[in-house]
Every structure is written in C-alpha cells, then in structure tokens.
Image (cartoon, rainbow, N blue to C red):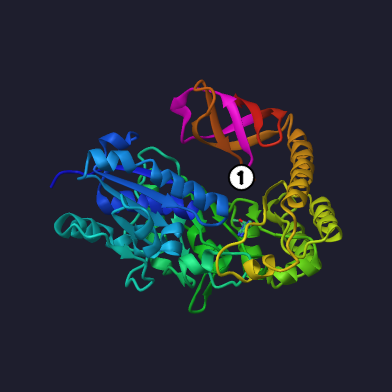
Amino acid sequence: MKTETLYLETYGCQMNEYDSDRIRNALGASLTEDPRQADIVIVNTCAIREKADQKALSSLGRFKNLKTKNPELIVGVTGCVAQLYGDDLIRRIPHLDFVLGPRAIPGLPRLIEEIRENKSRPVETSFDVEEPFDVLPYHQEGKPTAFVSIQQGCNKKCAYCIVPTVRGAEVNRPLEDIIAEARHLIAKGVKEITLIGQTVNSWKLGRLRFGDLLRDLGEIEGLERIRFTTSYPRDITKKMVESMTEVPKICRHIHLPVQSGSDKVLRLMNRTYTRNWYVDSVKRLRDAMPDIAISSDIIVGYPGETEDDFEQTMTLVEEVGFDSSFSFKYSPRPGTAGEELWRSEERVEESTAGRRLARLQEYQREISLAKNMKRIGKSELVLIEEESRNDSSWLCGRTEHNRIVNFPGEKELIGKMVEVRITEGLANSLRGQYIN
Ligand code: 5AD
C-alpha cells in the first residue's frame, strides 16, 4: 500500500495537537506543508469560541478549488467543530468528504477506505467507540517533550463551555496504558511529559487518584520532568499536593483557571467554588511549595458581569499575582446555559468587554514583566526544546516553572537540560546565557 500524503491543519488546545498526531499515526501518513501535494487534507478544528470555529470553517473553504481540480483529493474536517455541526457541514460545504468527531479517530482509516470505495460522504460523530484511547500519537524523532492524554471529555458543567458537548463525558485512561505510553516515549529519547486532560487532576480509576498517578510516573527511570494541564480548582487534593511537593520530577507549575474574581459571576458560570475558596487553594499550594508558578485563564464580559464584578477580577489578579494568564472575551456557544443568559438583558456590550479585556491584559503584562525581571542574575535549569522562532542561532526551552527562556546556542544542544544565567526579563519570556 502506498503511504498517504497528508496536509493537516490544527487549531485549538493541546488535546487537539495530540489528536492531530494520532490522526497522522492512524493513517500512517507522511505530512506535507503543501496541500497541492496531498492525497488527504484534514482541518482539525476548535470550537471553544466563535472566532476559533469561524477560522476553522474559513480554512476549509480554501480547499474548494483544489478539490475541483483534483476530485480524488479527500477533504475532511475533524475535531470539535466537526462534532458540533456534524451533518450541517456536509450539507453546507459541497467539497467536504467527511466529518469526524474527536472520539472517533480510531475509525479514520476505515472511513477513508469507505469514501474511496463508495464515494460516500460519512459523518462519524458517535461517542460510542470501544477503545477511545486506541491509536497512539506520532512522535517526532529527537523531540524531547511529549503530551500524554490521560483523560477524554469533561464532567464539569461550566455554563460558558462547549467542551462537554463536543468531547463527551469524562473517560479516564487506565494507569498501565499511561505508564506504557510514557515508557515508550522515554525509549525514544523524550525527557519531559505533559499529562493532558480537560480537568486533568480529576483523573481517577477505582481507588487510584491523580496524586497516585503522579507518584507512579515519578518512578519511571529516564523521565526527567512531569507536567500536567489543565487543573480544575475543586479537584486539588491533599494527595496531589503531597506528590507535587515530594516528587522532584514534577514541575512546580500549575495552570489553574479561575475564570472570574466575582462570586456572583463564578456562580453564574457554575464554577462550584468561590473567590475565597480559590485564594485558599493557592495558599495551600504556596504553603507547600513557596516557589510554585501559577497561571490561569480568565473570561471577561460574561453575561451579568458588572463593572464591580470586573473590578473583583482585577483585585484577584493582584492578590494572587499570577505568573501569567490567558484572558478572553466571553463568546456565546450554541446550546450552553451561558448562551441563554447572553440572550437576556444580562448581556455585556462588546465594547465594554473589549475595554475590560484590554485593561486586564495590560495589568497581567505588568505583573508578568515584574516577575520575570526578578529572575535576572539567577541561574535556571532549562530543557532545550527547539531553535528560537526568530533566530536560528538561538535556542528556546522552558524552566521547571514553565518560563520560556531564549539564549544563543548550537542546535546540537536541543534535548539537553542546561543551566542558563538569566540576563533579561520580558513580559512573556526570559533571555540568558548558557553556562558551560
Ligand atoms: N468564551 C470565552 N472563553 C471561553 N473559554 C471557554 N469557553 C469560553 C467561551 N465560551 C476559555 C476559558 C477556558 C479556556 C480554555 O477558554 O477561560 O479556561
């Protein structure tokens, strides 16, 4: 059988990147950067905000001419937009050959065969796959970092969020499979693994909890660093904090989305915790690990958010002092409780939300910059991941605390853990000199 040539475009979160690597492996395909060279074109989409899903759809439009010129070309859409709109996409986009939801990736090779044999246009969005974790992701030779999925779907009911609709209920992966994938990656030279799941720390299986999983992974020889994302605040347990404190391989960074600093808005979002509760959790983490880095996600302009509610988000950001945060304007998603609220008089004007977002992002920038400036003169252990984006005579890596460091160096050093003396602190990264 000839090797398929695949053009693959990926939008969205780490889970989607992971799924794209699974798609590549499922098809045993080689990748091309030029869609004109491809047998199959796939757009792996994100539905988290309206802008993301429009981007994915307009990207699909770009392949219309190509398909007309080459009717043998297979054009497909996968991921969360595929799951969300299903049949609708096939009806609306005449040059589209298939729609495949995120849970259905193991069935992709069969789907492609079916398309070629029957000239059909299948829509596969069932959550009922027997082995949702079948098909491991492709791993690029020499890359020192890798994701390992430990969970699919989400059981939380955050009112703004489309994820449970498009990725289904939470399914946790068996411990042995996670360990096996980690070992397999380490044998290939991987040094750092990031466990991924929508609410990664709610992983559980029988009597085992996330803290047990961390400890077991910590035993694996050759594995140097363990990260995980994204954590749900209410699912931080004593065991998890103990594992993080006691196992040196576990990086002292937690991505802990707060979403809002106002109790009223948190309630409307159905986040199941209060501002004080969140602040206490941060304190617990910092009491155990004074150096821990904390990052967050924040939504502004959620329906019902008053000026005063927004001020509470600003004071929370000040009080916690996030190392970094991602913030977004609320975007209504089809069929969610938030969308209903957005249709009422509670809706926040676009311009108001925009103004709040700009203020918040500027404030976070100042905080991150001040924190990064404090690193100047210190020596940091950096796992070198790749050449720097803007200058190939520079290298880029991360510290345990997830700070990005750029410094001059030879590309033979990629994959090595080195000491770097920090010389400059910027808002989103550090610069330094490699110490021999
Ligand atoms: N609108 C804006 N931001 C959203 N997020 C999730 N859903 C929405 C939405 N409907 C943000 C949250 C989440 C991050 C991945 O995206 O902050 O943590």
What crowding class fits label 1: few (fewer than 14 Cα within 10 Å), some (14-19), or many (20 or more)? many
Q: Quadrant of residue 396?
A: top right
The correct choice, above or below, for 38 with respect to 15 in the image is above
The correct choice, above or below, for 309 with respect to 376 in the image is below
Q: Quadrant of residue 115?
A: bottom left
> Is 415 one of the magenta-colored residues?
yes
Q: Residue at x 69, y 69 (%)?
A: 341
Q: Is residue 114 left or right of residue 349?
A: left
> Is 359 one of the magenta-colored residues?
no
Residue 297: x percent and y percent? Answer: 67, 54
Q: Name the residue type under label 1.
A: Glu
Residue 119: x percent and y percent? Answer: 19, 57
Q: Quadrant of ligand 1?
A: bottom right
> Which residue range is magenta in the image?
403-420
Residue 320: x percent and y percent? Answer: 79, 54
Q: Residue at x 81, y 67 (%)?
A: 276
- For the view shown, which residue lies furthest in the bottom direction? 206
Q: Quadrant of the C terminus?
A: top right
Residue 247: x percent and y percent? Answer: 59, 57
Read off the residue under disc 1: 400
Indicate yes or no: mark 1 CB to ligand 1 under 8 Å: no
Is residue 356 in view? Answer: yes
The correct choice, above or below, for 409 with respect to 44 in the image is above
- Residue nearest the observer in this picture, 15 or 164: 164
Q: Residue at x 41, y 59 (%)?
A: 82
